[in-house]
Amino acid sequence: MDPIRVGIIGASPDRGWAVRAHVPALQALDYFRITAVGTSRAESAQRAARLFGATHAFTDPRRLAEDPEVDLVAITVKVPAHAELIRMALAAGKHVYCEWPLALNTTEAESLTRLAEDAGVRHAVGLQTRFAPAIVRARRLLAEGFVGEVVSATVYSARHLGAGTQVPDWAAYTLDRSNGAGVLEIVGGHTLDVVEHLIGDFTDLSARLAIRHPHAVIEETGAAIEVTTPNHLLLDAVTAAGVVVSAHIHDSKVTNGRTRIEISGTAGDLAIVSGVNGPGGISLSELNLLGSRSKDTWQPLPGDDPLTEMTFGTEVGNVARLYAVLAQDIRTGTTTAPTFADGVHLHRLLDAIRNSADTATRVLTS
């Protein structure tokens, strides 16, 4: 079959998530071809096209979406621009892969989901950590009863970001609540999506959000900025099956970040553990799976990887695995990749967390 032709909006040749993850993932999969790239400047768009082997370079995202040699539009820009770009792609009748967060808020995400369903195209949101080999194997083992009846889950996830007092220039965008890309949305969203993917959806929760340092300094310039988005989330929740969950998710570490999700059951435990070297955050970390069915021993367990014939780093690998299942969805009409509806569910969960924190009450999640 002919390759699925992809146009990438936000395809900077110098930096960003597209060049780090999307481009190498697509280039590794022979059932995709990058045919178009878009950036805000003509020079960088032309350079990206040459570097990535694309035929077309655009500064106008509408023209990219309408190009007849584009089947799938990948949106890899900052969150505030997502909605407008998704609407352009859907109006052109194209499949869409949009990075998480899907939108700035739930209302916007719900509107985009209705448009995508009406357009009759395949739509995916970038919750790629579901496809990390350790997560895939953990989900299978839980279904097979490795831990018996799941009783509880304990979650810790932290990202290195200077303890909120001195931050790199790129991070200033994430500290402004209006941009929808803070620790709750990014680290919290990716982490809690994986937790629900493994043990089931939460039915109610209690949460606390905190801004431990309301001011920060940009490392490169010394400029002072105001921090308006929370950098700590404390959460306790319960699933429909009665599994109790506790979580601490934050952005404020001067040392390297790390993640540990420990799931305990009546017959044993599973733990998903990241390495300690790197920026941290579950979506950016190499994840290892450990299992125990006795009180003394944890054993490493290999992950399940459908792309075993290829060698990837963590960021590229998880995005490639999501693209692989999206290709199957496009070809066969299945729904394997996380859709915009999954994005709406996660936006609603984050709303419940904010509501609980604002009112100091326990709230239902649906």
Image (cartoon, rainbow, N blue to C red):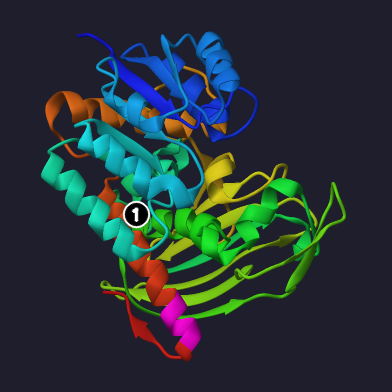
Where residue 247 appears, as percent x and y from the top left, is: 53, 70
Q: Is residue 216 magenta?
A: no
Where residue 334 appears, as percent x and y from the top left, is: 15, 35
Dot 1 corresponds to which residue? 197
Please name whichever residue, 352 or 312, is drawn nearer the observer in this view of the structure: 352
Does the magenta stretch mainly form a helix, a strand or a loop?
A: helix
**Residue 148 seen by the camera:** no
Numbered range of the magenta stretch = 354-358
Q: Determine the image quadrant of residue 230.
A: bottom right
- Callout 1 secondary element: helix
Q: How many marks?
A: 1
Q: Residues within 10 Å of mark 1 (few under 14, many from 20)?
A: some
Where residue 117 appears, as percent x and y from the top left, is: 15, 46
**Residue 300 seen by the camera:** yes
Please name whichever residue, 157 or 51, is drawn nearer the observer in this view of the structure: 51
In the rendered image, the vertical position of residue 12 relative to residue 156, given as above or below:
above
On the picture, is 331 further left or further right than 321? left
- Seen as rendered, the residue at the extreme right is 222
Q: Quadrant of the C terminus?
A: bottom left
User: Disc 1 marks which amino acid?
Assistant: His
Where residue 121 appears, as percent x and y from the top left, is: 17, 35
Q: Quadrant of the N terminus?
A: top left
On the picture, is 316 further left or further right than 15? left
Instruction: Residue at 58%, 42% (x, y): give it.
Output: 284
On the picture, is 327 further left or further right than 83? left
Please name whichever residue, 125 or 130, is drawn nearer the observer in this view of the structure: 125
In the rendered image, the vertical position of residue 278 relative to residue 39, given as above or below:
below
In the rendered image, the vertical position of residue 130 relative to residue 232, given as above or below:
above
Instruction: Residue at 28%, 14% (x, y): give it.
Output: 69
